[in-house]
Amino acid sequence: MSAERTAPGFTDNVTLIAAREITMRLRSRAFLISTGVLMLAVLASVLLGGILGEQSSTTKVAVVAGATAVVDEVDGLEPVAASDQDDAERMLRSGEVDAIVAPSASDPLGITVFGLDAPPESVIDALSVHPTVELLDPSAVAPGLAYLVAFGFGIVFFMSALTFGTTIAQSVVEEKQTRVVEILLSTVSARALLTGKVIGNSVMAFGQIVAIAVLATLGMVLTGQRVLLGGLGASVIWFVVFFAVGFVMLAALFAATAAMVSRAEDIGSVTTPVTMLVMLPYFLVIFFNDDPLVLGIMSYVPFSAPVGMPMRVFLGQAEWWEPIVSLVLLLATTALAVWIGERIYRNSLLKTGPRVRLAEALQG
């Protein structure tokens, strides 16, 4: 007796659809080129930042005999030996050095600093005697560094979510416009089709985020930025976790709203609300990265938590339990968004012609 052939189950159908989505993305030359450019841009920015930081860390000064011991003990100055005062002045006028440090019997420090046409502030500051400084908030981050990290989190979330979200929307409308979806629904359920699309594109988006994190880490290690890497470690891990959950929510909404139209020209009009949910966290974190109140609100609003909470972790503003509470809220919101999205998707997928109204899509 021949073995009975059993119909594929829900999990089998989801796996096949997800694999199809991943294969289509990997075969797309445009996707591969854009991903490669993004990866190179991330690595180049980290490497360039480290190189420029090293180049601007020292100032050349001509040192006349007798002042060598003073300059050698100062960080940020690169001493260039001069045989006498005349030799030091020649180097200063030719631009070989930025200042001259010569011994002086009348000065309390035992040295005199010479500039060409303006006081050499960097040399004076390096040689100045500074009092002991203690910080009341030692975890505070420099404003420039905070802005760069905020920009990094914001642009990566914005680009990845928008790229793969738009891809899902275009795929849904293309299948609906060409009637391919009717063939697919004759063998699989709408729930399996939506689940496969969301999982497939979520895997690709998650893989891109992990690749960016690995490249950024590699760049920091190669350029010796281990202090910055240590400070970023926990926030990057939380960013990856929050993004993985948050993108599932956005992907379901992109697919659901796209199913309400039958023409590619109408995609932008129905997906605009979801696109705004992607753009808003980007602009908020760029303009308010130094505002604890705005970041605190962002970290608990599900649509902005993938950017707001990792930023607060980096700045040291979040207690240990806050990312966990925020993640629970995000998981609950994602489950609700997937349920609503699946209902809209299922009720709109086979309706062609004019745009399906939201109330009609929800009621079925």
Image: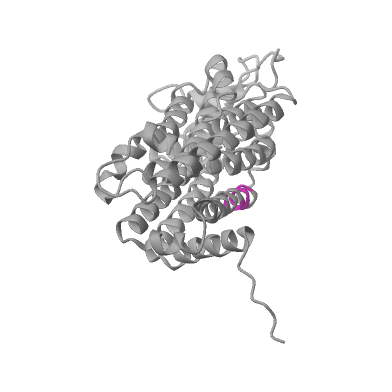
Closer to the camera in the image, 64 or 256:
256
Can residue 84 be seen in this snapshot?
A: no
In the image, farthest residue toward the right:
320
Number of numbered discs on residues: 0
Residue 80: x %, y % from top left: 56, 41
- Quadrant of the image occupied by residue 140: top right
Quadrant of the frame with the C terminus? top left
Can residue 220 be seen in this snapshot?
A: yes
- Residue at position x 33%, y 48% in the image: 351
Residue 207: x %, y % from top left: 57, 54
- Taking the image as shown, residue 51 lies to the left or right of residue 363, namely right
- Residue at position x 37%, y 35% in the image: 360
Residue 227: within the magenta? no
Quadrant of the frame with the N terminus? bottom right
In the image, farthest residue toward the bottom:
1
Closer to the camera in the image, 247 or 69:
247
Closer to the camera in the image, 126 or 262:
262
Q: How is the image coloured?
A: one colour
User: Where 58 sits versus 139, above or below?
Assistant: below
- Quadrant of the image occupied by residue 112: top right
Residue stretch in magenta: 214-220
Closer to the camera in the image, 166 or 5:
5
Residue 142: x %, y % from top left: 57, 25
- Quadrant of the image occupied by residue 313: top right
Q: Main secondary structure of the magenta part?
A: helix
User: Where 237 sits versus 13, above or below?
Assistant: above
- Residue at position x 52%, y 56% in the image: 189
